[in-house]
Amino acid sequence: CSPCPLGTYGINAGATTRQQGCVECPANNTYGIKEGQPSSETGCRTCAVGTYQDEAGKASCKPTSCPAGKKGINPPNCTDCRTGRYSQATGLTECRDCPAGYVTRHRGMADCTRCPSYQTTVTEGASTCVCEARFYRVNDTCAPCPEAGECDRIGSDLQNITLKRGVWRAGPGDNTFSTCPVNETCVGGNDTAAICLECHHGPLCAICNKGY
């Protein structure tokens, strides 16, 4: 008589072949620990955390192998890191946030990309770069804040830039800033609908309302 080999266990007495008398340890994260055993309880063992086995009848487990850019324990149950997060090595169970100033714009990334010059992120774990303070976004780049405006916070753009007093522009998408002939009539701010002093309107806030 020959013992059932490692990775299997015996269930049928009097069997004449291995196929008749031995059963493989199942593929659901188990492996064989000793040959010639009469049951799965004595012949098979569950894989340890950080390892797995997806094939039946094996004598050992495999190391967890979710690839870089993913997280998980047992393949094929690996999940892509979301945007703003990454995993650089094989077998990681969790993804990490990109540090401030770095982003991942797509899922499943193994590393983060540094924001372009004069750009940063609002928080760690971000997927979008914004302009640094004292810069504003125009034409898909970050330019120095114009003398006519204020860009004290990060994330300023052409639409939300704050105009200084005495400056006028035609609308939130207009990158042309003009000095008002009468400084007091242009009150500044970032609401172009209320950029003129009360009772004034029009280009450069130079037109008085009717009755003034």
Image (cartoon, rainbow, N blue to C red):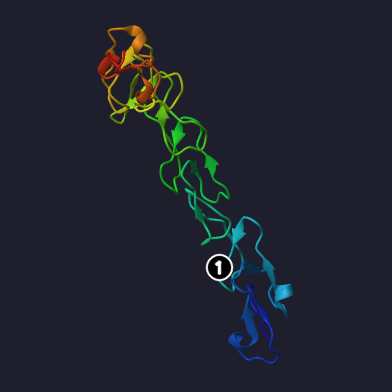
Secondary structure category for the residue under label 1: loop
Q: Quadrant of residue 5?
A: bottom right
The quadrant in which the N terminus is found is: bottom right
Comparing 147 with 2, the one in front is: 147
| Residue 154, x across and y down, in percent | 45, 25
Name above or below for residue 181 compared with residue 21.
Answer: above
Comparing 148 with 29, the one in front is: 148
Comparing 59 with 41, the one in front is: 41
Name above or below for residue 2 compared with residue 74.
Answer: below
| Residue 91, x across and y down, in percent | 55, 51
Comparing 137 with 196, the one in front is: 196
| Residue 63, x across and y down, in percent | 57, 57
Q: Residue at x 63, y 91 (%)?
A: 16
The answer to whether any part of residue 147 appears in the image is no
193 left or right of 7? left
88 left or right of 15? left
The residue carrying mark 1 is 54
The quadrant in which the C terminus is found is: top left
Q: Residue at x 31, y 15 (%)?
A: 211
**Amino acid at the residue labelled 1:** Asp
Q: Quadrant of residue 120?
A: top left
